[in-house]
Image (tube, rainbow, N blue to C red):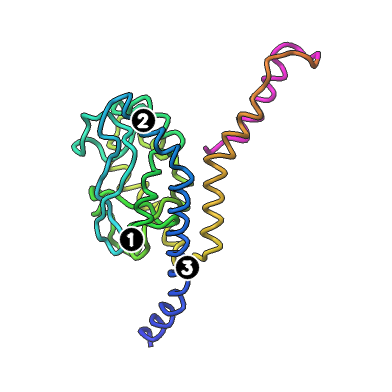
């Protein structure tokens, strides 16, 4: 009986899977085409600052646990390799100046559009984990690997500043295994089995707002230095800063 139900669910999900893949292919191809000048400028900036390599690649766990090579723009020094921490820390001394800018706006992730086009990843899916954390997929968490990893998703948004959560002076890798990974895994397992194309689109729009909309809004709310209102010098700016700080909690 259970096998019949599972087969029926798989057949019902098949059209959504095909539609999602179609959106991935056309979306990734369009994004690469439109953003090609930006991609070239980033590559040039990395090359001017520190030479080659321009890209960084690392094996990650893909669909059904199959490893694949994921690409990023290099944000660490060229002499760094996989022997260091698999996690990016706050004020990480491996980071280059250009790398800090790329990381702040998540621009180092753009080469993964190629992974989406290839079918290694989807636009929306669980974040692909490093092989260093393959041991975390147990006790039910292995079900996450039934979903194609993605660029965008609930955990990518909610934990976008996860490096600020690591304990000072503690073991970041152990903290990730014991605290952050289980928290993210539970969110993924609650979302992906019940996802729809519409709900995925909401996360895409949410991500676009965070990357583009929020910085523009903060810029628009930045206090002006002229004092034409007759208020005490600095008081209007202080009020605006207080309001902006209140709106940006949790970033």
**Quarter occupied by residue 249:** top right
23 relative to 75, above or below: below
Provide the residue designation for mark 1. Answer: 141
Left or right of 77, for residue 200: right
Left or right of 211, for residue 92: left
Left or right of 63, for residue 33: right
On-image quarter of the N terminus: bottom left
| Mark positioned earlier in the residue sequence (2 or 1) | 2
Please state which of residues 51 and 175 is positioned toward the viewer in this rendering. Answer: 51
Provide the residue designation for mark 3. Answer: 19
Q: Secondary structure at mark 1?
A: helix
Q: Residues within 10 Å of mark 1 (few under 14, many from 20)?
A: some
Q: CA distance from mark 1 to mark 3?
A: 26 Å
Provide the residue designation for mark 2. Answer: 44
95 relative to 72, above or below: above
Q: CA distance from mark 2 to mark 1?
A: 40 Å
Q: Residue at x 24, y 30 (%)?
A: 78
**Foreground mark, 1 or 3?**
3
Please state which of residues 220 and 34 is positioned toward the viewer in this rendering. Answer: 34
| Mark positioned earlier in the residue sequence (1 or 3) | 3
Q: Is residue 231 magenta?
A: yes
8 relative to 192, above or below: below
């Amino acid at each position: 009986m259970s096998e019949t139900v599972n087969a029926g669910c798989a057949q019902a999900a098949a059209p959504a899977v095909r539609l999602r893949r179609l959106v991935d292919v056309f979306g990734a191809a369009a994004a690469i085409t439109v953003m090609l000048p930006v991609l070239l400028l980033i590559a040039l900036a990395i090359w001017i600052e520190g030479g080659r390599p321009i890209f960084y690649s690392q094996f990650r766990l893909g669909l059904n646990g199959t490893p694949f090579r994921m690409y990023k723009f290099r944000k660490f020094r060229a002499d760094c390799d996989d022997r260091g921490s698999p996690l990016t820390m706050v004020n990480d001394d491996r980071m280059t100046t250009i790398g800090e800018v790329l990381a702040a706006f998540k621009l180092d992730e753009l080469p993964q559009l190629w992974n989406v086009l290839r079918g290694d990843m989807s636009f929306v899916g669980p974040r692909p984990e490093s092989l260093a954390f393959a041991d975390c997929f147990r006790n039910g968490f292995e079900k996450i690997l039934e979903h194609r990893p993605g660029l965008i998703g609930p955990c990518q948004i909610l934990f976008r500043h996860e490096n600020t959560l690591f304990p000072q002076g503690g073991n970041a890798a152990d903290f990730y295994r014991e605290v952050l990974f289980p928290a993210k895994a539970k969110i993924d397992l609650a979302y992906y089995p019940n996802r729809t194309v519409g709900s995925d689109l909401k996360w895409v729009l949410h991500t676009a707002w965070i990357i583009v909309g929020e910085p523009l809004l903060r810029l628009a709310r930045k206090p002006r230095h002229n004092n034409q209102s007759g208020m005490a010098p600095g008081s209007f700016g202080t009020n605006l800063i207080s309001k902006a700080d209140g709106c940006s909690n949790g970033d």
